[in-house]
Image: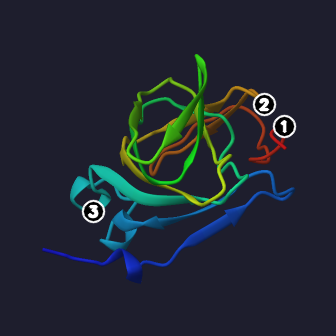
Amino acid sequence: MQKINTRDVADDEWSSPKGRFLGSSKSLSIALGRDAQSTDLLKRHPFDVEILRIPPGATPYPYHSHSAQWEFYHVISGAGTVRHEAGIEPIESGDAFVFKPGEPHQLINNGETDLLIYVVADNPIGESCHYPDSNKWLVRSPERRMVRGEDDDYYRGEE
């Protein structure tokens, strides 16, 4: 058995160039040895676990959906909202929700304290994401890729 303590896992912080998207996470799966580029499930892990921290007033990612990935969320502390196809809904400590492939979503901390969320996602190989607000696609694959299109900046059309 491999064991870690979350207090020993470094925060990975990010911010978009104009500062609209901001957050940090502790990637527990990476700390436990997950190799995201491997196609071997014993190295890749069948799921990814992180603790997401969203500061007050922040949104960590653009509105997006996954082509193959499921994501489970459990709010540890704080309050905010989640944007989804049906609108915007409040979330608070203790809430749990899931987004299946093809369901767009976005988290927003409109509270006064950090919003802490456990995120558990499966790890499909060959995952892609769609960004409805900017009509872009992100394509990921650890193996062969064939894409026809132009490279684009991740945040173009989002900020």
- The one nearer the camera, 57 or 50, is 57
The answer to whether residue 92 shows anywhere in this view is: yes
> Do tag 2 and tag 3 residues touch (Cβ < 8 Å)?
no
Label 3 secondary element: helix
Q: Are marks 2 and 1 in contact (CB under 8 Å)?
A: yes
Q: Compare residues 72 and 149 and report the one nearer the observer.
A: 72
Give the secondary structure at mark 1: loop
Image-quadrant location for residue 44:
bottom left
The amino acid marked with disc number 2 is: Ser
Toward which corner of the image does residue 129 lie, by quadrant? top right
Mark closer to the chain start, 2 or 3: 3
- Dot placed on the residue nearer the N-terminal end, 3 or 1: 3
Say if 122 sits above or below 117 in the image. Answer: above
For the residues carrying marks 3 and 1, which lies nearer the camera in this image?
1
Q: Identify residue for label 2.
A: 134
Up-down relation of residue 153 to residue 68 (above or below): below
* Residue at 48% from the left image edge and 44% from the top image edge: 144
